[in-house]
Amino acid sequence: MTDTHDTRPHLPLGLAQRGYTGVIQHLSAKDTGSALSDIELESRLIELGFVEGARVEVLHEGLVGRDPIAVRVDNITIAVRRREAMAIIVA
Amino acid sequence: MEAPLLHLALVGTPNSGKTSLFNALTGSRQKVANYPGVTVERKEGFFVTPLGRQVSVVDLPGTYSLRGRSPDEEITRDFVLGKASGEATPDLVLCVADSTNLRLTIRLLLELKRTGRPMILVLNMFDIASRRGISVDVERLAKELGVPVVTSIAVRKGGTADLLNLTDEISAKLAAEPQENTWRALSVAELRATQREADRIITDCVSLPSRPDTWTARIDAVVLHPVGGLVVLAAILFVMFQAVFAWAQPLMELLNSGFDALGEFVHATLPAGLLQSFLQNGVISGVGSVIVFLPQIIIIFLFILLLEDFGYMARAAFLMDRIMGGAGLHGRAFIPLLSSFACAIPGIMATRVIDNKRDRLTTILIAPLMTCSARIPVYTLIISAFIPAKDVWGFINLQGLVMFGLYATGIVSALAVSFLIKFFMLRDYAPAPFMLELPDYKMPRLKSIAIGVTTRAKMFLHRAGTTIFSMMVLIWFLASFPQPPAGATEPAIDFSLAAIIGKAIEPLLAPVGFNWQIAVALIPGMAAREVAVAALGTVYAIEGGKEAAEQIGQVLATKWSLATALSMLAWYIFAPQCASTLAVIRRETGSWVWMATTFGYMLVLAYAASLVTYNVAVALGAG
């Protein structure tokens, strides 16, 4: 599933625009500025389905600072702030 | 010999339809309480299986894992592990899944399996999944998971029949196979591995349609639009407020006159004296003045549960997250604060949806600043007595404008206080993350909502019958003793402890323009804000008390200056004038300190606001 995306540049989901679609490459919870510890942030993201290989699409953005974002992760929708989404590396 | 009570526990992710399954299984045979020492709601229900086995089922708080990152999730973990104090270890765990969205639940189930508890996977909302073209190979899924799997449609009559039969089947051979608990908190790597395993099983057993739920996408295109979404939210709120204030009115008046008639009946039947006064003024009018708010409580919870069930609440939090974040509040604080416009008590109770402790605390501290419906009688009385009903700029009613100003001041102050709390008290603290599933929209299930509203109404009545009742007795005592000497012509309350206290604190209140009569009225107002209206009637010796509100207004207009009236309005925006709210804060925070903090800061704000209002008004010639 990741093959077609290998050539695209990697970017944190936290910087993605509305309408962006991609596949999760890996999680990198370090230095996101989140209030959670690295381990806690990573655990929570996994629990909400943000795992390697999952398809993501940025569906909606909030009004202020385009934050938070609503992300389709495979077949569910998760709302997350851009700060935490920085830990999700997509391509 | 009759078989012992079978203990079931419902576990599942948030939005899995756990609660509607719980309602379908137990109907109205439910008990709602708190787990000892924490403020997590404990919901237990009872039913009988087709083979006649008596079953107790506990609806555990929704969770994505057993890590226990909030008090709610800790309860779920401890309960399943049999470590919750005073709770029986569940004989059988029902892991409830939303059939349209299995990923997260299958991962949770794989983790749950390690606890060794006998388990059934319930594929709930199976009808919705079928309609969307999702097909599940139930037999294969059961084999892969090593757990019996059953489908259910909680909202349809007979939709849980398979589950009931399976429960009978399994409970018959339960004791035979005790299993060991090998659960421990998962590391990130294990978590990832279980999610991979879950995804593999789903790929093997579930075929997903190529078309996603188009309705949810269509509704979200409007409802989550950055600007359009806020317009929709405002419209929903507008309807909600209309409902709370306009639709509830006739019912409230009915209840009010009912209690008045009951009071009159007691007055007429019993001989004048202490018992008559206790029943009429203490019990009936006191508890009655609180029960009158039942229609509003029912309507607000009806809206909250409908929107919750529909799937809108998470969207509201999404829309408001950054806007409230500017004041240091979490998106999920929106609903509790909104409920506080009806009454701070359900609002503070609703803060349980905020899992971060400090965010929750901030929300609890500012919730009483939202203008609750109990302030309305006081505002209405003073506004109609002192503010002329004329139009300004041709079309805006001045009285309405003042009312709006009072509401707006409450909201702005709440945001300011929240900002200050974050800035000074919790400064070292970065904002909690906002991570929330936005579930697909679903038609609200009326039966489930009816059960939910009834449960809330019962809780409210129970509180009115206990906490508020005892407060009322205390306040009646203060206002009635000592008794006036024989032949006294002044109202009886002039001789009471309340008057003694009122006169003692009068010097303190003189700078804000309050006389001792106001000070006296503020004391019964502690039980419920609006009781101050009746109390003012009593101290100004007006026959008929509460129902003579118009008369009280006329008297006040001659006895108070405009400055005093405005000062009283300012006082009421902020004053911690509600013993029940303080009691709920004490219960929800588990600490007297936060209750005292709320009381203290609100009192300071009230005094400062009244002081400024009074002196500015006097300086402008309204003294």
Image (cartoon, rainbow, N blue to C red):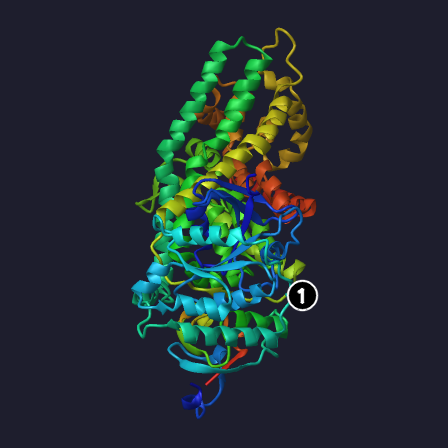
- The answer to which of B385 and B373 lies nearer the viewer is B373
- Image quadrant where one finds the N terminus of chain B: top right
Which residue sits at x=44%, y=80%?
A: A16
Q: Is residue B622 visible?
A: no
Q: With B327 as the anchor, is A91 left or right in this view?
A: left
Which residue sits at x=37%, y=78%?
A: A19
Q: With B300 as the anchor, is B476 left or right in this view?
A: right
Q: Residues within 10 Å of mark 1 (few under 14, many from 20)?
A: few
Q: With B506 as the anchor, is B562 left or right in this view?
A: left
Please provide percent x and percent y for residue B553: 45, 27
The residue under label 1 is B428
- The answer to which of B525 and B174 lies nearer the viewer is B174
Please provide percent x and percent y for residue B215: 30, 64
Which residue sits at x=45%, y=23%?
A: B259
Please provide percent x and percent y for residue A27: 55, 80
Which residue sits at x=55%, y=14%?
A: B276
Q: Is residue B335 visible?
A: yes
Please provide percent x and percent y for residue B467: 59, 33
Residue B273: quadrant of the picture: top right
B487 is higher (above) or lower (below) than B314: above
Q: With B457 as the anchor, is B118 left or right in this view?
A: right
B201 is higher (above) or lower (below) than B28: below
B540 is higher (above) or lower (below) than B394: above
Mark 1 element type: loop
